[in-house]
Structures are given as structure tokens and as C-alpha cells.
Amino acid sequence: MCNDWFENLLRNVELKPEEVELILMLEESVRKTLSKAEKQSAAHKLDHLLRVTKNALEIAKRESIDVDYLVLISACLLHDVDSPYDRKREHVELSARKAEKIMNELKFPKEKVEKVLKVIRQHSTETPVEITENEAKVLFDADKLDGVGAIGIARVFMSAGQRSMSIKEAIEWYKKKMEIAENMLQTETGKKMIKEKMDTVLNFLDRLERELSKYHQA
Ligand SMILES: [Fe+2]
Ligand SMILES: [Fe+2]
């Protein structure tokens, strides 16, 4: 089954026809893999991977940054492909390993596999490493963009709920996460796009904290 939204997204992207084919097969494979992953974090399912892909394409285009689009899109689709909600810190390595298996099954060229894995290993604030690849810079900001705005709020509280956190704990976690991410953003476009959505988050957290302050602080 083809996903029209995703196919449309690939139009006008600098890709060879055989690369488009490979990416469509990859999306299908990621979709199947995640449909069987019972412990996958609710905030890191296929919808997150697809939004990150769209964000990344927009950032790369607006930034006029030199990227290999096969690598960028593949890394977006695979960066959280194995993210169990109770093994957050390990998700980068778990995802890289599963990504390698998936790409090998689809017969990705060896040098592309290596590059995608490098990009995946540079995407997270959980395991900070130097971000050297252009594709990783774009993925980093595209990923963080999905953590702000109304969608970001929804994802954070879904994720916190899955790990049995209280509302107050979730707020603290979210604030810390945003502070770390904000200081690590990689592109001017990413910074601008995230800033636009940050007001929604700050207003919501302010409102939430004011409401909570009227109650017993558990
Ligand atoms: Fe991640
Ligand atoms: Fe992500």
C-alpha cells in the first residue's frame, strides 16, 4: 500500500527514480516494523518520522544546504525506528542497529548505509556527539521542531504518561529538554522555525503551572 502523502512529499526533491523507489520501499518497511513494535514510544511512531522528514526537507530547502537527499530522508525515517519507551537512552544505538538491518535487507548501497548510520548516531541530545554531517544538522533541527508547538506538547505528555510521570515531572522534563535542544540547534532556518512555535509551548506551560499552583503539589 502506497502512502500518497509521502509520495507527494518526494516530488520535486532532487532524487533519481531508483532512489525514490528505494525510499518508498524503506517507508513501507519502517511502517511494517513499527506496526509490530509493541513497546515503541508513543511519541516516536511513524507519524513522528514522517513529520520529521517533511520538516527536514523544508529546512534543507530554505537553508540551501548541500545534502544527499537519499541519506537525509532515510535517516529521518530510521532515526527513532527502535525507541522503546522504557529504554530512551539506548534508542540511538538500538535504532542504528535496526536501521542497518532494514537498509541491508533493501539492498541499499554500502556507502549510503554507512552515511545514514553516521547521521542517525548524531541526532540525539540523549547521546551528545559532535554533529559533523550536513544531513545530521538538518535532521537534528527537524527532529527538535516536532518537539515544540501544539504537536510537541502532545508528544511530550504522551511520552511522559507512558513512563508514569506526573504532570509536574513532565513539565520539568520538558523544560530541561527544550533548554538543552535550544542551545544545540544547527541551522538558522531551524532556529527561526522553532522560535515561531515556542510561544505556544511557553504560554501553555505558564497556564498549566498557574492552574497547578492552586492545588496540592504532589
Ligand atoms: Fe531520537
Ligand atoms: Fe525523533
Image (cartoon, rainbow, N blue to C red):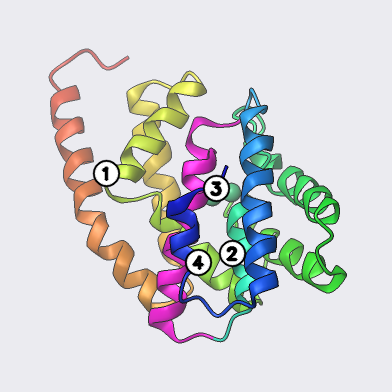
Image location (x, y in percent) of residue 185 = 45, 68
Region of the chain picked out in magenta, as a range: 40-65
Q: CA distance from mark 1 to mark 4?
A: 25 Å
Residue 36, disc: none
Name the residue at 40% across, 62% down.
Answer: 182
Mark 4 crowdedness (10 Å alpha carbons): few <14, some 14-19, many ≥20: some
* Pointer 2 with pointer 4, Cβ within 8 A: yes
Q: Nearer the viewer, mark 2 or mark 1?
A: 2
In this view, the residue in front, 99 or 32, is: 32
In this view, the residue in front, 191 or 40, is: 40
Q: CA distance from mark 2 to mark 4?
A: 9 Å
Task: Give the residue pinned by disc 4.
Answer: 10
* Pointer 1 with pointer 3, Cβ within 8 A: no
Which quadrant: the C terminus? top left
Task: Give the residue pinned by disc 2.
Answer: 73
In this view, the residue in front, 123 or 23, is: 23
Which comes before the other along the chain, label 2 or label 1?
Answer: 2
Q: Nearer the viewer, mark 1 or mark 4?
A: 4
Q: Nearer the viewer, mark 2 or mark 4?
A: 4
> In the image, what residue type sits under mark 3?
Cys
Image location (x, y in percent) of residue 137 = 55, 72
